[in-house]
Amino acid sequence: MPKRTFIRLDEDKKERVMRAAIGEFQARGYEDAKIEDIAQNAGVAKGSIYQYFEDKKDLFLYSVTWTIEYFMKMIDRQTPLKDMDIYEYFLSGSRERFEMIRKEPLLVSFAIDFTQGKYGGLAEEISRELKQVGEQYELKLIANGKKRRTIRDDMDDKLLLLFFQGVTEKFTMRVMEMAKNFKYEPTEEQLLEMKGLIESMVLLLKQGMGRN
Amino acid sequence: MPKRTFIRLDEDKKERVMRAAIGEFQARGYEDAKIEDIAQNAGVAKGSIYQYFEDKKDLFLYSVTWTIEYFMKMIDRQTPLKDMDIYEYFLSGSRERFEMIRKEPLLVSFAIDFTQGKYGGLAEEISRELKQVGEQYELKLIANGKKRRTIRDDMDDKLLLLFFQGVTEKFTMRVMEMAKNFKYEPTEEQLLEMKGLIESMVLLLKQGMGRN
Amino acid sequence: MPKRTFIRLDEDKKERVMRAAIGEFQARGYEDAKIEDIAQNAGVAKGSIYQYFEDKKDLFLYSVTWTIEYFMKMIDRQTPLKDMDIYEYFLSGSRERFEMIRKEPLLVSFAIDFTQGKYGGLAEEISRELKQVGEQYELKLIANGKKRRTIRDDMDDKLLLLFFQGVTEKFTMRVMEMAKNFKYEPTEEQLLEMKGLIESMVLLLKQGMGRN
Amino acid sequence: MPKRTFIRLDEDKKERVMRAAIGEFQARGYEDAKIEDIAQNAGVAKGSIYQYFEDKKDLFLYSVTWTIEYFMKMIDRQTPLKDMDIYEYFLSGSRERFEMIRKEPLLVSFAIDFTQGKYGGLAEEISRELKQVGEQYELKLIANGKKRRTIRDDMDDKLLLLFFQGVTEKFTMRVMEMAKNFKYEPTEEQLLEMKGLIESMVLLLKQGMGRN
DNA sequence: TATGAATGAGGGTTCATTCAT
DNA sequence: AATGAATGAACCCTCATTCAT
């Protein structure tokens, strides 16, 4: 819910503001984030922030929304995942995914943090939505897998989801950590290591929830 | 690092202060936590908090330490798990674990949060300790499992640990949520549901990382 | 002292701006009045206000002047009151006076407020003018009355003025209040009630300051 | 509604704070009044004001209440006015009243201002109460007068009240203005002038609403 | 000339920390 | 040692005024 003034801004300034905000929130947490610093980093005056957003909370909430939309666009651009096999899901676009992590570590870590509830009740409402979209998709993958007989059908979908999320979140975090460590282009070796990580994960997933 | 004054306090008051602090930090997050409210809830004067601790940060850090020590004691009290099978780990003692979650939901969720980095860099240093103790133990279970040939040996211990943690943490969270819903004693039915949850988890773990 | 730009505006826009300003000052008081709201209500851009007036104070001062001029014109238009008896003053033109209150409650109440000093020192200087014009006239009526022997001559004109103003202002306020309550045309009944009010007032005035 | 902290303060500090507040509100109006200046003038820290009052509005509201209570005490100390004749009301105790005006010009002018609605809607609630208390008393004086046959009985009490208030308020204002002009002790001459003013007023009142 | 975005000084408010009792 | 009042730095937010288009 930014104000009209913000909507009308040119893309460049909008992006500068949003990235400055996200950077500040991520660096200091919501309470400690200073509007003045955000404005400074975005290259605008403190007062301008209040021309764009109702208040600090509004700015934060839109930071979450903006990030979600950013990823939505990213994902849209990627191959349609409609009928993908749950195990293929990670093995396919993995290079693209690594790329994204490398190019947008700020957005990625911000997204992870608010999704995991690190911003307390603040982002809850918005991120719950995101979470559910994700869960819907994952549940569909699971249902698909049962139909294709690649996933065991002796267990409740909810339980399988728990298992699936537990494993994938943990590995994603691990990949994130690795990604943060290489500055520019990852070396071929690093990419291989990450690929190995993902393959192991898929193997474990397949073993665990697969129909053997 | 509380001051000498705090050390000398009688156990009851010490506990009241620590629980008030943890409750406040957990409810509002570090920045939003108010010393005044903590003092109030502990039934002491605001100034007294500063007789006990250097400052807010000191109080927070000790809240983490205190929680860690609490769990260390718990763990010590349990049957020596030395040679336990990794799958048995959850099935045995599950009732005890439920008990703890039910009796100390505050401490459990506080521990989960700071372990998972929800308090930003603040608790990192101290909580690393708890994390490592846990990890050491889990790695030992994994090594044991490999020896006993109950865990696949074609995969790196670190990767297996990741898998193990991902799954168990997610299920623990789920159990926590359930535990929050029953007020006093859980009904036999609720206990059964939780037990079913754990059994499914163990099954998935076994399938995934087991040697089939 | 509006700028040349304002002077050149067409009457309609000028009036919209002035009424918006007066409405805002009256509704919120000088300090709380927001230039933005005034501009909005006048249907012009905030910046335009600064093309018309030096600053907020300038706008306020001119609001006072504008109102005064409005009433001057009104008064000019009425039958020459030169030789009117002080008691007749209210009984004659009373319908016209009610009309004005009904048609311009905003201007009337604004005039009353700044005349009575509700805007602090701000309007003092300018409104003193209106006050003096009024007082001059009332003093003339009093002098006339003494000559005609309808007003007691054992009391100082200044004191009689005080008495006269006290009574008439209070009753005017009362009439204003009543006027606010009827939406469109006042019913004949309401007009009668107001007339009765005025007649009672005149009676009291006559008794008090008259020569019996 | 000051906080407990304020209630517990010693009388001297309480009075310093209240007078500083009233002085500031009276000098600059509500919006322009600065908490910092109030604190400074009271000789306390800005933050302390917030230990005493919820916020600026709370402080203002209590300033009104405090002033009212101050006058209540003053009046209580004076002769019981129970059965006083409406005309005697002003003639008796006039010297005491002048004294009060001279000694507490700040409180008096503050009281007049908020009673007359100069603080807009802010003090409305509280001052309405005060106004009604006053009106009740004045209506009683009028009823008494009718019984004693010192007030005409051919007119509605409400109308007589309007007349009475109009006259007395105006003259009170006039006396206030005069009082502001003498610094220390009023000269005997000045007292005489004020007395003359009051006597003229009573005469006019008596003529106007009296039974002749 | 009209517009509305940009600016930043100013002031209310919070709260960790200090201090007097 | 315990208390709770006192302090003031820090920060959000408002809005009159300026400025670029």
Image (cartoon, coloured by chain):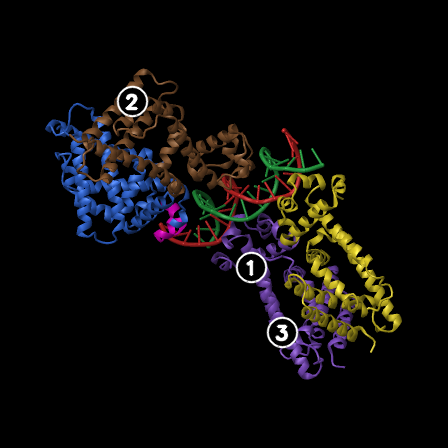
Chain colours: A brown, B blue, C yellow, D purple, E green, F red
Q: Which amino acid does label 2 sit on?
A: Met
Count residues near mark 2 (Cα–Cα under 10 Å), then give few for <14, some for 14-19, many for 20+.
many
Question: In the image, what residue type sits under mark 1?
Answer: Tyr
Is residue A100 covered in magenta?
no
The residue sitting at 69% across, 69% down in the picture is C188
User: Which residue sits at x=19%, y=52%?
Assistant: B187
Q: Mark 2 points at which residue?
A: A194
| For the residues bearing labels 3 and 2, Cβ distance under 8 angstroms | no
The residue to which callout 1 is attached is D62
Chain of the residue that carries numbered disc 1 in the rendered image:
D
Please tell me how crowded label 3 is: few (under 14), some (14-19), or many (20+) other residues with Cα within 10 Å. Answer: some
Is D139 situated above or below C72?
below
| Residue B209 as seen in the image, left or right of residue B56 | left
Res C17 label: none
Q: Which mark is residue D137?
A: 3
Q: Residue sitting at 73 percent across and 57 percent down? A: C115
**Residue drawn at the location 81% of the way across and 64% of the way down:** C138
Q: Magenta region's main secondary structure?
A: helix
Q: Nearer the viewer, mark 2 or mark 1?
A: 2
**Quadrant assignment, res B57:** top left
Discs 3 and 2 share one subunit: no
Three-letter residue code for mark 3: Tyr
Label 3 – label 2 distance at C-alpha: 88 Å
The magenta stretch is B38-52
Are the residues flagged by discs 2 and 1 from a single subunit?
no
Residue B46 counted in the magenta span:
yes
Q: Is any part of residue B118 visible from this angle?
A: no
Q: Which of the marked residues, 3 or 1, is nearer the chain's N terminus?
A: 1
User: Where does the image place residue C100, in percent across and percent down from the top left?
Assistant: 73, 60
Q: Residue furthest left?
A: B148
The foreground one among C45 and D53 is C45
Depth check: B32 or D163 in front?
D163
